[in-house]
Amino acid sequence: MYARPVAATAAVLGLGAALFSGPVAQADERGRTAPASAGRYGDPLIIAHRGASCAAPENTLAAVDLADRMGFAWVENDVQRTRDGELVVIHDDTLARTTDVEERFPGRAPWNVRDFTAAEIATLDAGSWFGPTWAGARIPTLEQYLNRVDRNGQKLLLEIKRPELYPGIEKDTLRVLREEGWLDRKHVRHKLVVQSFGADSVKAVHRQRPDVITGFLGTPTVADLPSYAAFTDQINPAASTITADYVASVQRLKGAHGKRLQVHTWTVNDAAGAARVAGFGVDGIITNNPDVVRDTVG
Ligand code: G3P
Ligand code: CA
């Protein structure tokens, strides 16, 4: 699975200025822009899925930095746990697709994240599969990832991935967030959302830290939405599963913090898809191509 060639779009690295040419935009202190007023579709938040994963290897610090340079404040990631209890940022529950693990550890199939130590994982190349430009990129620990997002002044939609594989990962995640300063008032109110496909995982986060904003990944039936609203602030469904009526049904409710329940949908990578879900009135769009979505809805 290693060394799969991908058209590494290093050219994107130089696009920052051109991406901010909208007619009514105000720059924040880091030069990132937001619409000065609601546009044709309102102002859905744009979230860079696994970082700027269209143009840098997903879930790496390089993808975080590229999202920052492209002007995106929000990044999404995936958190799992190593054999020795370190939290790391990777999407798949095996290391095979996005690293050189098969070459480096040929006798360790199926190369589960949970079967490797953090020290072993730290030696893997998590960039070359995406393109030679990215050779040597590493799988970051959650600690490293949080520090980079913070250093960039960005915000994080943190996904607890496959929680059924990692009993207690919610407590571990909250511990690392606390240790790295992400559970102070500023971060909790403005910079952090914790989401999962596991309803029990989202409930556990809400129970352990009721102040943290949470999201449930999935599309509960309209009849079930009130029970989700008791422990979550966002219903985050696949774009293919929603309609304008569904979005309205979610937004009619109040979430766990007494504010309107929100919809952040995924993974929308083209202009037509972005226009479709923006037309439904979603609150956020999670995308591998944030610049394409911005050109459409921003
Ligand atoms: O944030 C939503 C999205 O990341 C969920 O799907 O498989 O990419 O983690 P997946
Ligand atoms: Ca994810």
Image (spheres, helix red, strand yellow):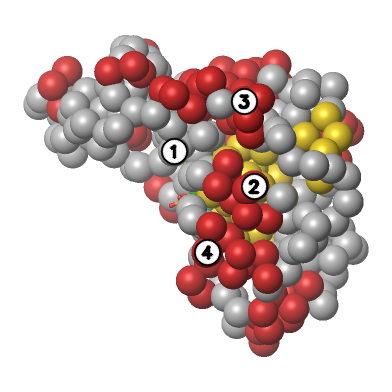
Whole-Å distance between the Cαs marked 1 and 4? Answer: 17 Å
The quadrant where residue 235 appears: bottom right
Q: Which tag, 1 or 4, sits closer to the chain's start?
A: 1
Q: Secondary structure at mark 4?
A: helix
Q: Nearer the viewer, residue 26 or 241?
A: 26
> Residue 16: which disc?
3
Callout 1: SS: loop
Q: Is residue 294 above or below residue 270?
A: above
Taking the spot 48% from the left edge, 53% from the top edge, the residue there is: 269
Q: Which residue is situated farthest in the left direction here?
A: 107
The N terminus sits in image quarter: top left
Which label belongs to residue 54?
1
Q: Which residue is mark 2?
A: 294
Q: Residues within 10 Å of mark 3 (few under 14, many from 20)?
A: some
Between the C-alphas of marks 4 and 3, the distance is 23 Å
Query: What residue did someone put label 4 on?
Result: 272
- Residue type at mark 4: give it: Ala
At horizontal 17% and vertical 18% (from top left) the residue drawn is 104
Image position of 271 (left or right of 249): left
Image spot of residue 23 (x, y percent): 80, 42
Categorize mark 4 by other alpha carbons within 10 Å: few (<14), some (14-19), many (20+).
Answer: few
Q: Tell me the mark number nearer the camera, choosing from 1 and 4.
A: 4
Structural distance between the alpha carbons of marks 2 and 1: 14 Å
